[in-house]
Image (cartoon, rainbow, N blue to C red):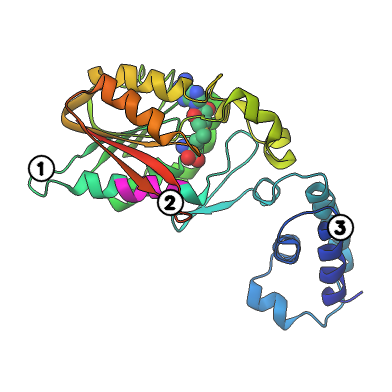
Amino acid sequence: MILRQALQRASEALASHDIEDAPLEAELLLRHALRMSRTGLYAELGQEFPPDKTETFWQLIGRRLAHEPTAYIMERREFFGLDLHVDHRVLIPRPESELLVEKAIELARRPPGSPRRLIADIGTGSGAIAISLALNLPQSKIYATDASAAALEVAAVNCERHKVADRVWLLQGDMLAPLPQPVDLIVANLPYIEEGALGQLSAEIRWFEPMSALAGGADGLESIGRLLAQAGGKLRPQGCLVLEVGRGQAGAVTSLAESHFPHARVGLAPDLSGMERAVIVEV
Ligand SMILES: C[S@@+](CC[C@H](N)C(=O)[O-])C[C@H]1O[C@@H](n2cnc3c(N)ncnc32)[C@H](O)[C@@H]1O
């Protein structure tokens, strides 16, 4: 069988299991099995499939047919232009969370005379947000916390890979408790899926991603509410928060923020689909 035929068959198999973007996913897995670039693959499509790679490739396709996300199969995901290691210990970073990074960079650089240099990323998972901030804010020091020791192992791999281990301090513990000092800026993408919606998530998410990264309690706002309740004691003067929220949660989180910080300026930022995705609290 030549590579073009294998690609076609894999794509059809994925499509028959209702896997979105089947042709793209088949291509990614084929390139992963053959360790080939996109241009390399397209130049070789007429060549015979290497016999020693056949089993590996169809095993990868089998895993995807069983709904394992491609990012876990390939153990990588791109976020904010960075190649990150990901595996079942962490949530796969989502493109919409890049908005948090953009907003946090803006806030960290403002005001120009006294930038906000001390930052905390709460619930860091793979370290995606903390590492993106460290690379774009070279003067900053970042505490990246997570309740999950296993997630922090992944974050440590990514900090080493991107050479920011000297500026990103990984701390295990609940919410803001591990922070050794108040900070200028708190960024958090905490679990926010409400209990009743967990069962409706795709098999990819429900069966493979850590539930502790998703479940936000009865109304989805348990973690975010706890963070806001604690934040007052962990923010320096002129401090601010950037929080990711789920669909329809921006209003409730704004009210929560206003109740904990009655004098703060609370704003919202939409993601690329137009959904209010980030709540920004300037204390
Ligand atoms: C939605 S994931 C976000 C991961 C990463 N920040 C990202 O954007 O890809 C939430 C993360 O919060 C962590 N987490 C959940 N409850 C926590 C708590 N009480 N304290 C600290 N971290 C918590 C989870 O382990 C998980 O890594």
How far apart are labels 1 and 2 at the CA level? 28 Å
| 167 on left or right of 261 | right
Asked which secondary structure carries label 1, the reply is: loop
In the picture shown, does residue 178 fall above or below 238? above
Mark 3 Cα shell of 10 Å, populated few (<14), some (14-19), many (≥20): few
Q: Amino acid at mark 1?
A: Ser
- Total marks shown come to 3
Q: Amino acid at mark 2?
A: Asp
> Residue 265 at what x, y percent from top left?
20, 35
Sequence-earlier tag: 3 or 2: 3
Q: Is residue 69 visible?
A: yes
Query: Residue 16: which numbered mark, if any?
Result: 3
* In this view, the mark in front (1 or 2): 2
How far apart are labels 3 and 2 at the CA level? 31 Å
In this view, the residue in front, 135 or 26, is 26
Q: Amino acid at mark 3?
A: Ser
Query: Residue 114: which numbered mark, if any?
Result: 1
CB within 8 Å, label 1 to label 2: no
Mark 1 Cα shell of 10 Å, populated few (<14), some (14-19), many (≥20): few
* In this view, the mark in front (3 or 2): 2
What secondary structure predominates along the stretch shown in magenta? helix
Q: Residue at x 76, y 54 (%)?
A: 19
Mark 2 Cα shell of 10 Å, populated few (<14), some (14-19), many (≥20): some
In the picture shown, does residue 166 fall above or below 19? above
